[in-house]
Amino acid sequence: MTKSDDKSPSTALVACGVLRPELAQLETEGKIDFSEVHYTAPGLHDNPEELERQLRKGLDEALKTADRVVVGFGDRCMFNLAAPERTLDAILADYGDKVTRLQAGNCAEFLADDETRKEIAADREVYWLTPGWLKYRKAVFRYFDESRKGEAFGRCAAAVLLCPLGTFDELAMSNPEVILDLSDWMELGIEPAPVDLTRFEKLLDDARKSIE
């Protein structure tokens, strides 16, 4: 659980906007209770300079009132080809021991560990999606030209939507064009893979406890 009591130091969360659906569900279920939550725009993994700017803004705002901050990004969410030393951990190091991040690579790894993803992939190269990738697809894929599409999707046999919220079934009933249009654009079939939020909740909880 990531619930806090009144005697605990306050803990804020700064997270990628692509995680809004999962975090909203955990909040609805009463499984997280951060003092405040700040979001960057979704899809900034392809714009590291803007990601760093928005991340620092979120951290600076959070630390005005919170004692510590959990960062909802993984170590694979940021790579700056022009400045490879500007890793996510290098940025967070500027804030000392008040700040930590989730100990996983990216949002797909937040929802399913290596073993689970290997089982789902079934010896195929797949492109992993999460609910936010569908919901915010225009933002997430805004930097993809034809060359980038070929690099990202060309070797994949399918796109797999890790689905802890019933997103695929809901869209298939209410607005199937969303799935069909994205599938056509990616030139990949999109397959749902049911998972739950247990791993994500634990990663949040572990990160919080690491800076208590």
Image (tube, rainbow, N blue to C red):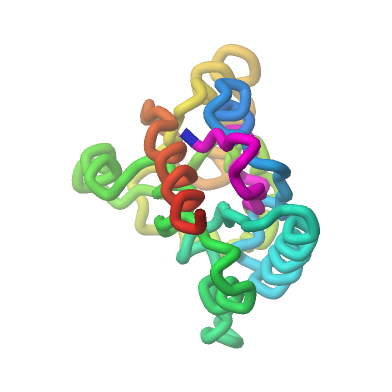
Is 133 in front, or is 178? 133
- Residue drawn at the location 22% of the way across and 39% of the way down: 119
Is 63 in front, or is 153? 63
Residue 15 visible in the snapshot: yes
Task: Please check the rendered image and state whether residue 132 is part of the magenta-colored stretch, yes or no.
Answer: no
Residue 189 visible in the snapshot: no
- Residue drawn at the location 61% of the way across and 28% of the way down: 27
Q: Is residue 29 above or below residue 125?
A: above
Residue 51 pos. (x, y %)? 68, 66
Q: Which residue range is magenta in the image?
A: 2-22
* Figure quadrant of residue 95: bottom right
Task: Please check the rendered image and state whether residue 8 is part of the magenta-colored stretch, yes or no.
Answer: yes
Direction front: furthest residue: 7
Q: Is residue 184 above or below residue 125?
A: above
For residue 131, side relative to residue 47 (left or right): left
Residue 67 pos. (x, y %)? 67, 56
- Residue drawn at the location 35% of the way across and 41% of the way down: 112
In this rendering, the count of numbered labels is 0
Residue 93 pos. (x, y %)? 56, 76
- Residue drawn at the location 53% of the way across and 84% of the way down: 84
Q: Is residue 93 above or below residue 124?
A: below
Direction top: furthest residue: 173
Residue 21 pos. (x, y %)? 61, 33
Is 120 in front, or is 16? 16
